[in-house]
Amino acid sequence: MKTFNKIFQGDRVIWIVVAFLSLMSLLAVYSATGTLAQTRHDGNNTFVLLSHAATLAVGLVAMYVAHRVKYTYYSVLLRLAFFVSVPLLAYTTFKGVDLNNAQRVVEIFGVSFQSSDLAKVALIGYLARMLTIKQDEIKDFKNAFVPLMLPVLLIVGLILPENLSTAAILFVCSIALLFVGRINLKYLAMFMLIGIFALTLYIVIVMNVAEDTGRTHTWINRIERFISPSEEESEEGIVITDENYQTMHAKIAVASGGIFGKAPGRSTQRNLLPHPYSDFIFAIIVEEYGLAGGVFVIMMYLILLYRAIAIMVAIPQSFGGFLSFGLAFLLVMQAMINMGVAVGLLPVTGQPLPLVSKGGTSMLFTGISIGIILSVSKEVNKIKEKRDELKPATESDS
């Protein structure tokens, strides 16, 4: 047991959550990639499974390495990552590789790389550092709020043209982190209004002036379909059309799962849903493992957030607390949006389910994020151990 604790340091509950989500990832992706194996790998499901297992292993190794690094070093490392991510995002926007009609990916030495994943982690780290530095003047508009607001607007503004959902998630997470960091509520309300105004202005300009509307038209269509779905009814029920194809098959998957599901590997909608191994993997999980399996996955993410908040409360240093909360909130919010899309509560976004969905860059930076949280939790454990050592000495003196 001592050897295990030396190897896997930090919060044990988070390690358990990681283990369960990793196992679910292997099972769900293997089941959901049947069509992918048929179309791209001559029906070789084993190759697809091994490929995903290798990707998952890379994420877990990144997590392990990140958790071994003392969390205070991330103050410098994530600040450097922030300054790297700004030109990288700009390059991706103008020179990125087209993916689903959006330039979200840049190729580095032949490897596809989603620069927004780096930018998300870097921005949270940068904000955590700045909040720590500015705590003595945190209520000051010019010296605290403005230096915190500008980096958020810069990163979110660079992500926005190609990925509205990621930009929105990062914006909301930044506001949550600033709220925890004791920024004046009046300033936060103003910040939200600035964000809404900037998004509205961008859409109006792009739709009325720009020759190429980019992803804007897709956003509007998805939101319109969600608010006012065009459901044609026949004697057999609602007709599945091109417009409602994704959402209807996801709803069918969720509805047919029942309480305990059809059993692993028995999904029928995996052959009909586009990207059932990433965007709609939660629908496949509910179909195969039922409501019980879906609730279990939701609980795993909520436990992760709870443990991160507990770490934030327990650690004396502000930077570690802000970093732990910010990264966990980012991951859990992304997870909730993915699951909300799968069950029809939100419009289609294309967000993967952290640590579960198939995807290289997402898996890598999810692993790094959880590793950083574990690194902070190591410090909390050290503080608890010192307190436990002092207790016997105090009792003997008395």
Image (spheres, rainbow, N blue to C red):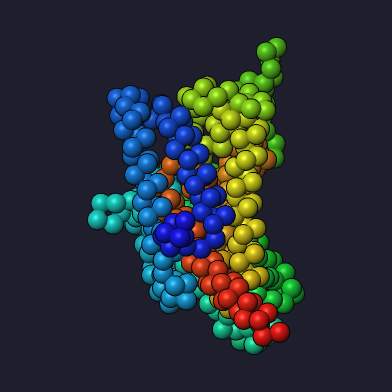
**Image quadrant in which you'd find residue 247:** top right
Q: Position of residue 249 (x, y in %)?
A: 58, 27
Residue at image point 64% right, 64% down: 309
Residue at image point 63% right, 20% down: 239
Please state if 341 lies on the left or on the right of 378 as rendered.
right
**Image quadrant in which you'd find residue 393:** bottom right
Please state if 138 lies on the left or on the right of 94 as rendered.
right
Residue 371 vs 343, above or below: the answer is below
**Image quadrant in which you'd find residue 44:** top left
Give whichever of 124, 303 is nearer the camera.
303
Assign the C terminus to one quadrant of the image.
bottom right
Seen as rendered, the residue at the extreme right is: 186
Residue 326 vs 259, above or below: the answer is below
Residue 181 vs 116, above or below: the answer is below
Residue 154 visible in this rendered orientation of the protein: no
Q: Position of residue 278 (x, y in %)?
A: 48, 40
Give whichever of 95, 301 is nearer the camera.
301
Count of marks overlaid on the render: 0
Q: Position of residue 103 (x, y in %)?
A: 41, 51
Seen as rendered, the residue at the extreme left is: 109
Residue at image point 28% right, 57% down: 108
Residue at image point 41% right, 52% down: 60
Q: Position of residue 166 (x, y in %)?
A: 53, 54
